[in-house]
Structures are given as structure tokens and as C-alpha cells.
Amino acid sequence: MKSLLIPENVNIKWGKDFFQVSGPLGTVTKQKGNLSFAIKDNRLYFLENIEDQKKHFYFSMISNLILGVSKGYRCKLRLVGVGFRASIVDNVLILKIGYSHEIKYVIPDDIKILCGKAKGTLLIIKGKELSKMTQVAADIRKLRIPDAYKGKGIHYDKEILTLKKGKREGK
């Protein structure tokens, strides 16, 4: 039977239709469905015999939640382009990304965004839920997708772009 190790600083509680994972970075509550759990010797076991796909899905979801409330997740975005800058005022991310106006993005409550000191061109997104953190990063990146010819836009950190040749470079 497959089990999941629970760190000492993480607590798991469950009720009839929910389970709650809490740790040093906060608490996350999710719907449980028809699953039954048991905890023995700091390990989480599934009691019911369910399909392998569902078991793998729930297993990975719970392990992601445990990792999120104990260590957290983070993603880096780089703003590449002349004059591209980011700043944070109150709970709003203000982006200057080549448009005639500033783009304002309201930061969700359970997500934290930090601006890097390198002229405001590095964004660090932190969260305790992997799915929400990656969704926020994708939403911000969608505001200015990297250009295929010059590479200007919002990049994931360590993202490798293959640029197209311009019509004058081919000669």
C-alpha cells in the first residue's frame, strides 16, 4: 500500500466532505470526495480501493499541498524590453510593458509578489498552492507574451526562446 510521509510541522484534518492541510505557511482546505484516509506513524494511507488514476491524482494533490504549506512554491518572471518595469502599490501590481498605459493587476490574497531590485524587471511569485501560483504567473505572462522576433515581453525565468529570423536577416 502506497503511503505519503507527513512532516512534523504539518497537520492534516478531515471531515465528511473536506480535508485540511495546515503548516507554518498557512492552511489549505479542499473537498475530499469519497476518499477515506488513515494516518499512522506520520504517514497518510488511502483506506479505500480506488482506481489507480484517481489515487495518483489525489496522492499528488495532497503531496503538493503538504509541500506548499511547509516550504511554499515560487516562480520567477522577467520583464524583457526597453522601459519594461514593475512595481507594487498596496495590493496591486503595476506593469509598464510597452503599452501607452500602465497595466494594473490585483494580487490575490493568498499569493505574494515581490519585485526584484534590478530596476523592477524581476518578479517573484510565491504561494502555498501550486495551481494558484502557476495560474497567477500565467495570467501575468499573458499580459505581454514574448515576441517571436525580438524576444520582448514577460518571460518565465530560465525560459529558452527560439527567435524567428527577420526578413532581412536571411540574406
Image (cartoon, rainbow, N blue to C red):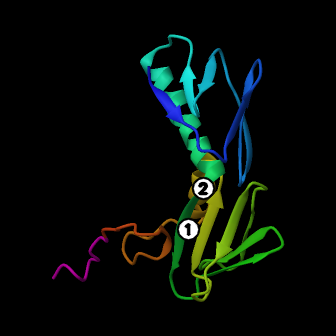
Q: Residue at x 54, y 39 (%)?
A: 63
**Can you tell which of label 2 and label 1 is closer to the viewer?**
2
The vertical placement of 46 against 67, above or below, is: above
As shown in the figure, which amino acid type bears the numbered disc 2? Lys
> Does residue 135 appear left or right of residue 166 in this picture?
right
Magenta-drawn stretch, dominant element (helix, strand or loop): loop
Question: Residue 102 in the image: x percent, y percent?
Answer: 72, 77
What is the number of the mark on residue 71?
Answer: 2
CB contact under 8 Å: marks 2 and 1: no
The span picked out in magenta is 163-171
The percent coordinates of residue 41 (x first, y second) are 57, 30
- Identity of the amino acid at label 1? Arg
Image quarter (top left, top right, bottom left or bottom right) of the C terminus:
bottom left
Which of disc 1 and disc 2 is earlier in sequence? 2
SS class of the residue under badge 2?
loop
Up the image or down, 27 lies above or below 146; here it is above
Q: Position of residue 118 (x, y in %)?
A: 57, 87
Residue 96 in the image, given as x and y percentages of width and height:
65, 79
Find residue 108 and report its image quarter.
bottom right
Which residue is disc 1 drawn over?
144
